[in-house]
Amino acid sequence: MKLTSGTDDVIWNPVIHHMGVIPQSGKSAVNKARGIRTDMMKKIIGILLVLVFVMGVFGCSKSEPEPDPNQLTLDKVVELSSKGEELTWEDFEQYHGVECGSGLYIVRYEIDGDYELMIGGTSATGSPMYIHLVRKDSEDESGFIDIRTEDVQAFIDETR
């Protein structure tokens, strides 16, 4: 819509007027509106870039996972070893283990990248025949102990 007021032609644009731009002349009103849009776009792009950066920083940070209470750890093995000959299959029921025996009942408990616990017996009741803490990279008999009769903490300290 074009309004005429004597000497200057004024372009009336409801969108520009709504944005707070009061046109003084046709070209200056359009240029002013473009300037406002450009400034607004710069602010929006700046805010979006900041948001992307913040999400990248906080979204990629790794938090420590909650420890699995059913995962056997070296600390738990040391604690369990204090029961000595009183240890039974039931003491290990709550932990994640894999049956791997053939002929004997054998369960392997992954502890970490270096150790595992091997329990073996004729059945899954009563006392096991052995409960061995095994250093995985060991190639001889010095790489394991029976946690019921030997010093678990000393073994860990020696083999680390």
Image (cartoon, rainbow, N blue to C red):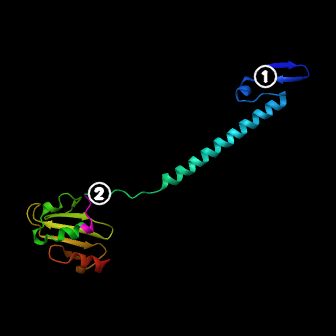
Placement of the C terminus among the 4 image quadrants: bottom left
Q: Is residue 101 visible?
A: no
Q: Which secondary structure dominates the residues rendered in magenta?
A: loop
Residue range highlighted in magenta: 70-75
CA distance separating discs 1 and 2: 69 Å
Q: Amino acid at mark 1?
A: Trp
Q: Nearer the viewer, residue 5 or 136?
A: 5
Find residue 84 and report its image quarter.
Answer: bottom left
Specify the label residue 12 is tagged with.
1
Q: Is residue 66 magenta?
A: no
Q: Residue at x 53, y 52 (%)?
A: 56
Which residue in the structure is indicated by mark 2?
A: 68
Q: Amino acid at mark 2?
A: Asp
Q: Is residue 78 visible?
A: yes
Q: Is residue 44 above or below residue 130?
A: above
Q: Nearer the viewer, residue 71 or 20?
A: 20
For residue 26, side relative to residue 118 (left or right) = right
- SS assignment at label 1: loop
Find residue 157 and report its image quarter.
Answer: bottom left
Circle 1 crowding by C-alpha within 10 Å: few under 14, some 14–19, many from 20: some
Find residue 48 and report its image quarter.
Answer: top right
